[in-house]
Structures are given as C-alpha cells and as structure tokens.
Image (spheres, rainbow, N blue to C red):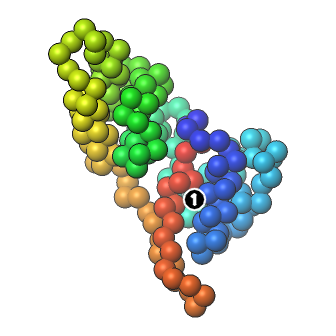
Amino acid sequence: MGEIRASDVVNAACDALVAGFDTPGLRILAACTRAEADYDVHDLLPAALDELGLPFYPVVGQAGQEAAARALARRMLASELTPREFTFRIHQRYGHELPLTERLAELDDEYDVLEYGDRTVDQVDAEVTAEARRIATHPTDPAEPTDTTADAHGPTREFPLSRLRFL
C-alpha cells in the first residue's frame, strides 16, 4: 500500500524466519537483496502471505485502503507517528473520500486553523487518538494473527505476522 519500503518487507520476512516461521515463500522473500526487493517483493509477497494464512490486500480498492489506514492507526498508537503526522498522512493519501477516515481528514484541517479557533493542540491530539483507537479496532479488520513459538534454545517469542502485509 506504499506505507513501507520493499526492503522493510524483506527484513520482516527475515524476522519471521528467526521467530520460527518457515514457508517456502517466506524463505524466498527473505532471501531478496536490497537491490532485488524493489522489483521482486510485489510478486513474492502474495504467495508468502497466503502460505502464512494472512490476507493480501490489493493496492486498489477500499479493503486495502482501510487495512492501510488501520496499520497507520496502530503505528500512531505505538508512538511511531505523532497525531499530527498521522492525520496529515491519512488526509494526503485519502482526502475526504474514505468513509473510515473522514473524521481524521477533518481533524487534519483543524490542525491548520488552530490559531483561529478555541481548541488546543492537546484537544485535537486527544480526538485523533480516540479516532486511531476506533480505526485500529474497526470490525472489518480480521484478527491480527500472531504466533508464539518456543524452542529448546530460548524463551517464547512473538512475531506479528501482519508486519508483512503492507507495501
């Protein structure tokens, strides 16, 4: 969906292998060099996700857009994006056209006019955070699969397989 670099998908595939996931498609994906990643990941990712039992969302279509918005919302809630950055990216990508994120586009507009209104940055940030929580748990989002693996060599590890979903 354009949210991460192809090399980050390859790194996530490597992390999944280290965490104990092992499928042929995942091995091929993890073996991509940085130079190959930009060309090959788009073709390799659907098969690798299918082998792991994860959905693949096409770049076009509302399902893919909503899945990408949910991923961005989770990133904001994990403090990888500020509320302002989150609303800006959502507004820039979807404008006011995606029903799931319409309020975020409006809140991005509110950031732009704070000096003329009676709201504070903290108030808008709080509303953005509430919207991010709503979007991250939107009922059309399939359960985020994770697997816990334990082996004789170390502690239990968890790997969020959905890290592989978004390009």
Vertical comparison of 160 with 19: above or below = above
Label 1, on which residue? 50
Left or right, 36 with respect to 95, comes to right
- Quadrant in the rendering for residue 3: top right
The residue lying toward the viewer, choosing from 145 and 10, is 10
The amino acid type, in three-letter code, at marker 1 is: Asp
Q: Residues within 10 Å of mark 1 (few under 14, many from 20)?
A: few
Q: In the orientation shown, which residue stands out farthest toward the top?
A: 116
The residue at the point 58 percent across, 57 percent down is 49
Tell me the residue at 32%/27% (across/down): 104
Residue 46 showing in the rendered view: yes
Q: Is residue 45 above or below residue 38?
A: below
Quadrant for the C terminus in the image: top right
Among the 4 quarters of the image, the one containing residue 5:
top right
Residue 123 lies, with reference to residue 11, above or below; the image says: above
Residue 44 placement (x, y as % from top left):
70, 52
Q: Residue furthest left?
A: 118
Apparent side of residue 92 relative to residue 112 in the rendered image (left or right): right
Q: Position of residue 128 (x, y in %)?
A: 29, 33
Q: Is residue 70 visible?
A: no
Q: Front-most of 41 and 121? A: 121
Q: Position of residue 67 (x, y in %)?
A: 43, 42
Tag 1 secondary structure: helix
Vertical placement of 39 versus 47: above or below? above
Which residue is at a point 45% across and 35% down the rendered structure image? 65
Judge by depth and name the residue closer to the eye, 90 or 120.
120
